[in-house]
């Protein structure tokens, strides 16, 4: 959860729940209870990952909604539901990336933040369509996950990759055509994403550079979910003891959708103000 995108976490959690299908249970009800308890534990592992919560809830609701006459039947159906949901998550990411790739044109300069498998796939698809791109990647302190993004982009032909410190984004934005970031989730009119997204969006808006967030449409949530930020250990920021001061290390920040220009999901590209309609 510290180094992977939220959709990857959702898929891994779904596969983890599969362990319930190999255990023995005396009754179907006991299996249902075990499935609920383990799914709840997975959701509690990170209360900020909307896709983790929605996929886990769907698995449990669909399995418990059946009328299984044996534990084996319930377990087989659990595997079927997990396979379907994992395929849907992975397919929706691919469709979102395909949609977002059409935003990019040959010769564009793009700035991206942190590590997003959907953004990475978007750039790969744009290159496959004949684009040559220059990409600036923020290193994304304090865990430096942007370095992982830069290494992934560096092996793609026709992508000139540049790694920059987070605070240098404003220096390079005037040379950029687009800012492209992933999404942890959108709740009402707020984009929740890796910390550093909000100041990047504000700077891009001031510089007049269009900013797009790309991800699965299932990450756009209205009601029934309250985003809870994660605060990580101080040693990620500074290893020596903090004497006389506190170290704050939030994992995510909240970006008002009014600072963005567009949202791209597997359902297509939309103006940011259309989020509530979505």
Image (cartoon, rainbow, N blue to C red):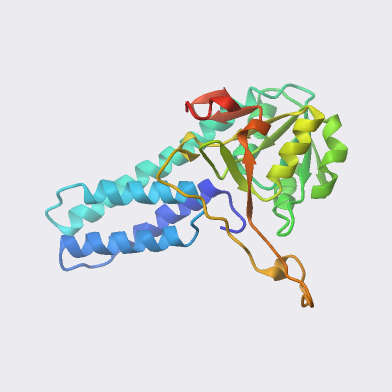
Relative side of 216 to 213, left or right: left
User: Residue lying farthest front?
Assistant: 244
127 or 204, nearer to the observer: 204
Which residue is the extreme one toward the left? Answer: 69
Q: Residue at x 70, y 69 (%)?
A: 234
Q: Could you tell me residue 221's position as x and y percent?
A: 46, 39
Q: For residue 211, which quarter of the picture?
A: top right
Q: State the image coordinates of residue 144 (x, y, percent, origin top left).
A: 73, 56
Q: Is residue 207 left or right of residue 78?
A: right
State the quadrant of the N terminus.
bottom right
Viewer-proximal residue among 153 and 138: 138
Query: What residue do we see at 62% from left, 56% from top?
Result: 3
Quadrant assignment, res 224 = top left
Q: Is residue 139 above or below residue 244?
A: above
Where 271 sits versus 236, above or below? above
Q: Residue at x 73, y 70 (%)?
A: 246
- The one nearer the camera, 139 or 128, is 139
173 vs 66, nearest the viewer: 173
267 in relation to 6, above or below: above
User: Residue 107 placed where, x, y %?
Assistant: 80, 24
Q: How many marks?
A: 0
Can the viewer see residue 80 in this picture? yes
Q: Is residue 113 visible?
A: no
- Extreme-right residue of the structure: 171
| Residue 226 x %, y % | 47, 49
Where 149 falls versus 71 (above or below)? above
């Amino acid at each position: 959860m510290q180094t992977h995108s939220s959709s990857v976490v959702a898929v891994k959690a779904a596969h983890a729940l599969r362990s319930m299908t190999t255990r023995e249970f005396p009754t179907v009800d006991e299996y249902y209870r075990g499935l609920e308890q383990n799914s709840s534990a997975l959701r509690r592992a990170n209360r900020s990952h909307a896709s983790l919560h929605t996929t886990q809830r769907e698995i449990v609701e669909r399995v418990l909604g059946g009328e299984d006459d044996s534990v084996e039947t319930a377990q087989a159906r659990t595997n079927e539901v997990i396979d379907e949901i994992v395929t849907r998550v992975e397919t929706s990411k691919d469709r979102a990336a395909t949609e977002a790739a059409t935003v990019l044109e040959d010769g564009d300069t793009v700035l991206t933040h942190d590590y997003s498998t959907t953004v990475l796939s978007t750039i790969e698809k744009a290159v496959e369509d004949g684009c040559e791109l220059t990409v600036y990647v923020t290193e994304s302190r304090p865990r430096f996950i942007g370095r992982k993004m830069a290494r992934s982009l560096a092996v793609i032909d026709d992508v000139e990759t540049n790694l920059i410190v987070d605070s240098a984004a404003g220096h390079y934005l005037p040379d950029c055509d687009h800012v492209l970031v992933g999404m942890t989730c959108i709740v009402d009119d707020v984009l929740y994403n890796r910390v550093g997204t909000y100041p990047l969006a504000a700077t891009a808006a001031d510089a007049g550079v269009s900013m797009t967030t790309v991800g699965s449409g299932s990450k756009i949530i209205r009601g029934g979910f309250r985003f809870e930020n994660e605060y990580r250990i101080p040693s990620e920021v500074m290893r020596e003891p903090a004497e006389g001061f506190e170290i704050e290390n939030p994992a995510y920040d909240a970006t008002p959708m009014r600072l963005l220009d567009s949202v791209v999901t597997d359902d297509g590209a939309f103006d940011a103000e259309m989020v509530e309609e979505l």
